[in-house]
Image (cartoon, rainbow, N blue to C red):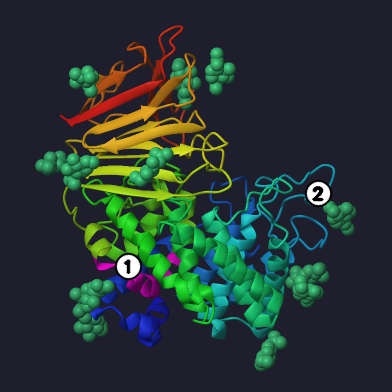
Amino acid sequence: MKAAIILGRLAVLGAAATRRATGANNATNDAAEQLLQESMNWMDMFYDAEAGYLYDLDSKALLHDTRSSAWYAAGLLGRNEGDDAEQAAKIVDNIIAGQHKNLSAQWYGDYQIYPEEPTVGTPQYPPKIYNSWDPNWRGFIGTTFILMLEEFPELIPHDTQTRMLESLYNATVGDSYRVGGVDDDNLYPSYSNPAIMRAFMSGWVGRKLNESNMTTAGENYARDLVNLFDRASTLSEFNSGTYAGVSLYALTLWAKYLPASSLMGERGADMVSKTWVILGQLYNANLKNVAGPWDRSYGYDMNRYLSILALHIWTIVGKEDAPINAKPYTMGHKNDFAIGPLVAILAPFHNTLVPNATLSALQTFPGTHNVSTSAFSPPWDTYPRNITAWLSPNLTIGAETFAEDVIGGPAKNPSSFNPAVVQWSRKDGSVGWLTLHAEVEELNAVASEGKLELEYPQGNATSTFTFLVGTNSRAGKRDVAEWSDVEGVKIGINGTVDPGYSVQFSGLVGGAGKMINEFELWNFTYGMPQNSSETPRVVLSFELE
Ligand SMILES: *[C@@H]1O[C@H](CO)[C@@H](O)[C@H](O)[C@H]1NC(C)=O
Ligand SMILES: *[C@@H]1O[C@H](CO)[C@@H](O)[C@H](O)[C@H]1NC(C)=O
Ligand SMILES: *[C@@H]1O[C@H](CO)[C@@H](O)[C@H](O)[C@H]1NC(C)=O
Ligand SMILES: *[C@@H]1O[C@H](CO)[C@@H](O)[C@H](O)[C@H]1NC(C)=O
Ligand SMILES: *[C@@H]1O[C@H](CO)[C@@H](O)[C@H](O)[C@H]1NC(C)=O
Ligand SMILES: *[C@@H]1O[C@H](CO)[C@@H](O)[C@H](O)[C@H]1NC(C)=O
Ligand SMILES: *[C@@H]1O[C@H](CO)[C@@H](O)[C@H](O)[C@H]1NC(C)=O
Ligand SMILES: *[C@@H]1O[C@H](CO)[C@@H](O)[C@H](O)[C@H]1NC(C)=O
Ligand SMILES: *[C@@H]1O[C@H](CO)[C@@H](O)[C@H](O)[C@H]1NC(C)=O
Ligand SMILES: *[C@@H]1O[C@H](CO)[C@@H](O)[C@H](O)[C@H]1NC(C)=O
Ligand SMILES: *[C@@H]1O[C@H](CO)[C@@H](O)[C@H](O)[C@H]1NC(C)=O
Ligand SMILES: *[C@@H]1O[C@H](CO)[C@@H](O)[C@H](O)[C@H]1NC(C)=O
């Protein structure tokens, strides 16, 4: 079993690995190996050996996909059975051949979204950031190349390694074109996940190729990021099931592959630990969910959408106890399963950085408690977002107060920005949820015992509060027309809103609205009394049924 070789490297990882006694590490090894194998078995089904690319994981009429191919290539080296290593080199060479090579283009050094795409920047295929090209793919694919070079140099042909370094050099130069606020780009140090990858790639490539400017640029960017983090020991992109997982991955690269003389090497491990401290406080092991608020979420119940954070949790507590379905590829946002190999390969190191209190909280809910912290995302935030959460065994409430110059958080995406969230456990063990749909630039939101208080300080008589509520359990009522139809919880409402409310369904094939993040939902909407001059305010109270 070749996977055992890489995970067996644990034995030679040195100081970091010996930080934690053997028990947890053995469990980590088994769980990480299982994650590697399961994610690879799934991707094997999509591999087109003739092309040397993975087919698109959503089956787009035989188109291929670049980023998941890179992640698969890393997994091939981790597994290293049969001709795995040969296929990995083939994939890598393909990806590099398709890397954008026009030095004056904004997308220089970036990697294609898919190999069949037209040339970006032609009249017929205009450059559209995050569409026809994705600036974050330099970081996603570049860091994957670095991980491959660090972990498996003996499995990569020498000439491929040379091309990888050249490709990384180009990607780093291209990434330096990114300046938040310029040319539609949004990379500020507060855009945590790509910012951490940028600093790392620049620092690593600079050291590797003796490009001191790159090394310095990486360190400087890291310093901005670290300063932002140290304000409250939180990532700006706070508590995102998907992107906290990416940030933890990238911070692990800081800790594992950069020397202590680098700020990143110095601080990476500490930042991984501190990120886990707050995640541990917000985690409810009964519900297997991290309580809100979620700055960027691709779902409302971690048991039903695949979050990268859940892949880390899998390696820490095992698949059974993690928020992951037995068949991960049936979950919402399933394609992120493709990053499984990277999480698995880093787990023996990364998991030594998880604090004991968090390790315990990931397994057993420690009892009712409050959480209070803050996160700051300049330039969007006027002041740091105040975060409050109340967690009890079967009911959690989390919210954040903010004033931003955008609606839907820095990503300007009301579907992923969830500033006030409630989750509860139902009789069959499934999870009910409620989230405030993001409609305003300013919100006062406070979570406390059984209560969620919301206010739009800049609102007026036209304001509405829309609560998106998950569908009932499979055995529960199919139809919902009022609050009392919502399973598992009694909800009371107070405030300056008009007490009358509308209820709509957003379903798979019908209803008034469309599903959001692959979740069906009920839309409870409140308006203000006509001509009201009061500040829009609503207080929800929750009691388990
Ligand atoms: C961990 O694994 C090693 C090697 O398989 C074994 O010798 C050791 O007893 C295990 N430790 C624990 C705590 O299970
Ligand atoms: C390279 O990109 C620049 C800027 O987008 C463009 O003006 C130029 O035509 C491109 N060159 C080639 C060879 O495509
Ligand atoms: C790197 O970019 C240069 C143009 O600046 C190009 O000539 C070269 O082929 C690129 N290298 C790789 C590996 O793509
Ligand atoms: C970088 O510098 C070191 C020490 O001066 C040297 O050993 C190494 O070969 C250089 N690497 C490259 C890629 O130039
Ligand atoms: C490095 O940065 C300095 C100062 O900004 C600049 O003068 C020099 O040209 C840069 N060197 C390279 C190789 O880019
Ligand atoms: C975590 O617990 C282990 C085993 O009880 C102990 O050796 C270790 O010092 C603890 N680590 C921390 C950071 O408290
Ligand atoms: C949570 O905070 C409130 C006041 O903010 C306090 O009354 C309550 O006792 C706290 N609950 C717990 C479990 O600490
Ligand atoms: C945020 O919380 C801090 C500390 O609890 C408090 O001093 C501050 O007034 C709060 N700010 C807002 C805008 O609620
Ligand atoms: C929480 O829900 C579970 C499952 O329905 C139930 O067994 C347990 O008694 C509940 N705990 C509390 C404290 O309500
Ligand atoms: C009420 O708020 C909306 C949304 O911010 C705004 O467009 C509208 O002009 C406001 N109306 C009044 C009367 O202030
Ligand atoms: C609503 O407010 C009234 C008056 O403050 C209070 O008596 C009542 O308990 C509140 N109801 C809920 C559901 O919070
Ligand atoms: C929710 O329902 C309201 C009232 O019908 C509607 O205006 C709004 O667009 C709906 N929002 C979503 C996210 O479906």
Question: In the rendering, at what x and y percent does residue 371 appear?
Answer: 28, 48
Question: In the rendering, at what x and y percent does residue 441 appear?
Answer: 52, 32
Residue 499's place in the image compared with 27, above or below, is above
Q: Give the side of residue 36 with respect to residue 157, left or right.
A: left
Question: In the rendering, at what x and y percent does residue 79 appear?
Answer: 45, 74
Tell me the quadrant of the picture where the N terminus can be found. Answer: bottom left
Q: Is residue 260 visible?
A: yes
Image-quadrant location for residue 68: bottom right
Q: Residues within 10 Å of mark 1 (few under 14, many from 20)?
A: many
- Amino acid carrying label 2: it is Gly
Mark 2–mark 1 distance (CA, rounded to whole Å):
44 Å
Residue 101's place in the image compared with 536, above or below, is below
Q: Nearer the viewer, residue 13 or 96?
A: 13
Q: Which residue is mark 2?
A: 121
- Amino acid carrying label 1: it is Val
Residue 180's place in the image compared with 460, above or below, is below
Q: Which residue is mark 1?
A: 354
Is label 2 within 8 A of ligand 2 (CB to nearest ligand atom)? yes
> Which residue is situated farthest in the top direction here?
530
Q: Is residue 36 visible?
A: no
Q: Residue at x 38, y 86 (%)?
A: 14
Pointers 2 and 1 in contact (C-beta within 8 Å): no
Q: Nearer the viewer, residue 257 or 145?
A: 257
Q: Secondary structure at mark 1?
A: loop
Quadrant for ligand 4 reads bottom right
Q: Secondary structure at mark 2?
A: loop
Q: Nearer the viewer, residue 60 or 505?
A: 505
Q: Which residues are magenta?
A: 341-356
Q: Residue at x 52, y 57 (%)?
A: 193
Q: Main secondary structure of the magenta part?
A: helix
